[in-house]
Amino acid sequence: MSKDYKPPYVKKILVSSRKVKKGIKKAAKWLDDKFMSKKTTPIFVSVLKGSLPFYGELVKHIHFDVLFDYIAISSYKGKITCTSKPKIIFDLTNDVKGKDVVVIEDVVDRGNTLSLLVSLLKKRKAKSVIVMVLVDKSDMRTVPFKPDYVCFELLHDPFLIGWGLDYNEKARNLPYIAEFDKSYIDRI
Ligand code: IMP
Ligand code: MG
């Protein structure tokens, strides 16, 4: 088998590809336990673009019907700090009124993006909202926000790449979660 791609801007692999997959399988089991016995078809909302690899892996392991939907919320201007208020740049195609909604996101950091999204879904009268995140940087919050399910908690502010997480739109395809080497800022 060929080795995983490891570009020079990867400072350290924090969660291996095998561990990420195992963690996501566990998340799918948690969702199965919640929804398998219910007569409901939840809407799975992928927060673009970062959640796509997590979303794709998660849905392979669930055992109930779901509807796929997507939303894009932008707050980063390509570097490693938040520079603007989150804004919806691509909206859902489903009406969420009276529906169970499962939000799938790569990371919760300051909490702005997901708290905006959850209040929007509640304003649109979703019956229930569950938030699943691949990574929680829980010590970084500026807005109080608690996801319903966290696959991995990573503290002390490493800038993360891989499994959908990007630096300047790159590195989303890395099959592990890694720390970005900040000496590569503005160089890739
Ligand atoms: P928030 O600060 O919780 O609103 O996070 C907003 C968005 O910032 C996330 O959806 C990610 O797209 C991005 N983000 C936060 N931390 C990281 C990171 O460590 N690596 C890559 N993107 C991040
Ligand atoms: Mg994101």
Image (tube, rainbow, N blue to C red):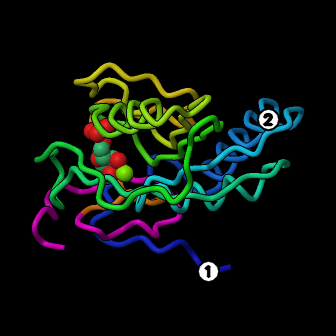
| Residue 179 at least partly seen | no
In the rendered image, the residue lying farthest to the top is: 144
Q: Residue 141, how many percent across, how many down?
A: 28, 25
Query: Residue at 61% across / 49% down in the picture?
Result: 44
The reply, left or right, for residue 12 in relation to residue 125 is: left
Using the image, determine if residue 187 lies above or below residue 137.
below
Precedes in sequence: disc 2 or disc 1: 1
* Image quadrant in which the N terminus is located: bottom right
Using the image, determine if residue 167 lies above or below residue 12.
below
Secondary structure category for the residue under label 1: loop
The reply, left or right, for residue 97 in relation to residue 50 is: right
Mark linked to residue 2: 1
Stretch in magenta: 168-188
Q: Residue 11, how many percent across, how many down?
A: 31, 56
Mark linked to residue 35: 2
Q: Tell me the quarter of the picture where residue 114 sits.
A: top left
